[in-house]
Image (cartoon, rainbow, N blue to C red):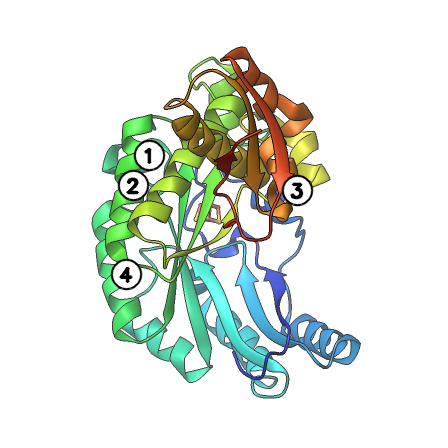
């Protein structure tokens, strides 16, 4: 993006009107908070309002929530046309999310014409068994084809994965993460699975057929995936970890690792692991630990639980902020 102007997203939620069926975990209305499908007029109004409120910001319009390229073709084009009027006049591009089986060459050509810049695919899992069990309606092979075409057309590529779907294990989570790394997307979003009321997964949970991840396991597993991305593919930007905090999710959730600051919890876990790997080479005792000043609360953990669990292992830690320290990389100093 040019000129050092602030960048922002202007989200428009398109509920699952384009989806051929319902995935087991999906209650888009709860997740996105959107009750009705937007009209082209809504899109125009949103752009006009946002641009007049903050004319100095570079805004990217984001059609999120449903399967954008699977919605009725005329309706899809009417939304794109409404958005396209503002491209180059404050809106720098359009991004959208969709399904891996809904990105054929014809629709990609249409998206190109209306200045769509980035496409995010809901991959969720690269195991066909898990995809089928969660009624995704597409296969891992569809993801290979979709990724290839999106790259061929020159769009920015985003991939989304889920952790803790029905049938998912630590191994299949890591397998999916490895495959996503191989696809070399520009961005990734990682969502832990939350079982919501009024969904198939919620029903399975009530019947005892599905066990949701606990918050602790969800954080641990997600932190492992984030570390894997950091180690093997630091250029892939992790733009989201965990669902957006929302009252509707909180009111409708039956199980699963939901927390309004989920990413923060995962980063806190990563910092604890990194610190522990240094401490384990040292005598038990008291140490001062230097962290980037922005990471002091992450290092301490929620309710100081990192400090307490390290103390239980025999390491008394005092945390000190130091600008020279790389974010998320605590460094043991002396005391
Ligand atoms: S494809 Fe996405 S929006 Fe559609 S039902 Fe599945 S999870 Fe929901």
As measured in the structure, the alpha-carbon distance from the residue carrying label 1 to the one carrying label 3 is 23 Å
CA neighbours of label 1 inside 10 A, class few (<14), some (14 to 19), many (20+): many
Nearer the viewer's eye, disc 4 or disc 2?
2
Place of residue 81 in the rendered image (x, y in percent of width and height, measured from the top left): 54, 81
Q: Residue at x 38, y 62 (%)?
A: 186
As measured in the structure, the alpha-carbon distance from the residue carrying label 1 to the one carrying label 2 is 5 Å
Sequence order check, earlier mark of 4 and 2: 4
- Choose top left, top right, bottom left or bottom right for residue 268: top right
As measured in the structure, the alpha-carbon distance from the residue carrying label 4 to the one carrying label 1 is 21 Å
Q: Nearer the viewer, residue 20 or 224?
A: 224
Place of residue 320 in the rendered image (x, y in percent of width and height, measured from the top left): 63, 38
**Disc 2: which residue:** 176
Q: Is residue 113 visible?
A: yes
**Disc 4: which residue:** 146
Nearer the viewer's eye, disc 4 or disc 1?
1
Q: Residue at x 43, y 25 (%)?
A: 279
CA neighbours of label 4 inside 10 A, class few (<14), some (14 to 19), many (20+): some
Task: Check whether the beta carbons of the residues at disc 1 and disc 2 lie within 8 A of each other.
Answer: yes
Q: Is residue 164 visible?
A: no
- Secondary structure under tag 3 reads loop
As measured in the structure, the alpha-carbon distance from the residue carrying label 4 to the one carrying label 3 is 30 Å
**Disc 3: which residue:** 245
**Disc 1: which residue:** 173
- Secondary structure under tag 2 reads helix
- Secondary structure under tag 4 reads helix
């Amino acid at each position: 993006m040019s000129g050092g102007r602030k960048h922002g997203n202007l989200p428009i939620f398109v509920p699952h009107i384009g989806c051929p069926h319902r995935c087991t975990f999906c209650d888009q209305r709860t997740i996105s908070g959107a009750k009705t499908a937007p009209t082209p007029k809504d899109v125009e109004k949103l752009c006009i309002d946002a641009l007049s409120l903050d004319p100095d910001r570079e805004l990217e319009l984001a059609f999120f929530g449903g399967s954008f390229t699977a919605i009725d073709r005329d309706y899809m084009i009417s939304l794109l046309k409404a958005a396209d009027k503002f491209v180059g006049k404050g809106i720098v591009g359009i991004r959208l999310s969709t399904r891996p089986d809904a990105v054929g060459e014809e629709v990609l050509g249409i998206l190109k014409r209306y200045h769509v810049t980035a496409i995010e695919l809901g991959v969720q899992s690269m195991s066909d068994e898990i995809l089928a069990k969660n009624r995704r309606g597409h296969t891992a092979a569809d993801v290979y084809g979709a990724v290839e075409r999106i790259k061929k057309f020159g769009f920015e590529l985003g991939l989304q994965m889920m952790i803790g779907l029905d049938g998912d294990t630590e191994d299949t989570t890591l397998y999916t993460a490895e495959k996503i790394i191989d696809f070399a997307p520009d961005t990734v979003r990682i969502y832990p699975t939350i079982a919501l009321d009024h969904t198939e997964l919620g029903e399975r949970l009530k019947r005892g057929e599905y066990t949701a991840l606990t918050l602790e396991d969800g954080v641990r597993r997600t932190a492992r995936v984030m570390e894997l991305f950091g180690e093997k593919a630091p250029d892939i930007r992790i733009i989201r970890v965990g669902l957006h905090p929302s009252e509707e999710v909180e009111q409708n959730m039956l199980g699963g690792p939901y927390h309004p600051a989920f990413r923060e919890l995962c980063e806190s876990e990563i910092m604890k692991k990194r610190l522990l790997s240094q401490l384990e080479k040292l005598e038990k005792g008291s140490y001062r630990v230097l962290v980037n000043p922005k990471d002091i609360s992450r290092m301490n953990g929620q309710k100081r639980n990192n400090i307490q669990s390290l103390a239980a292992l025999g390491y008394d830690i005092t945390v000190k902020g130091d600008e020279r320290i790389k974010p998320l990389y605590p460094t043991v100093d002396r005391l």
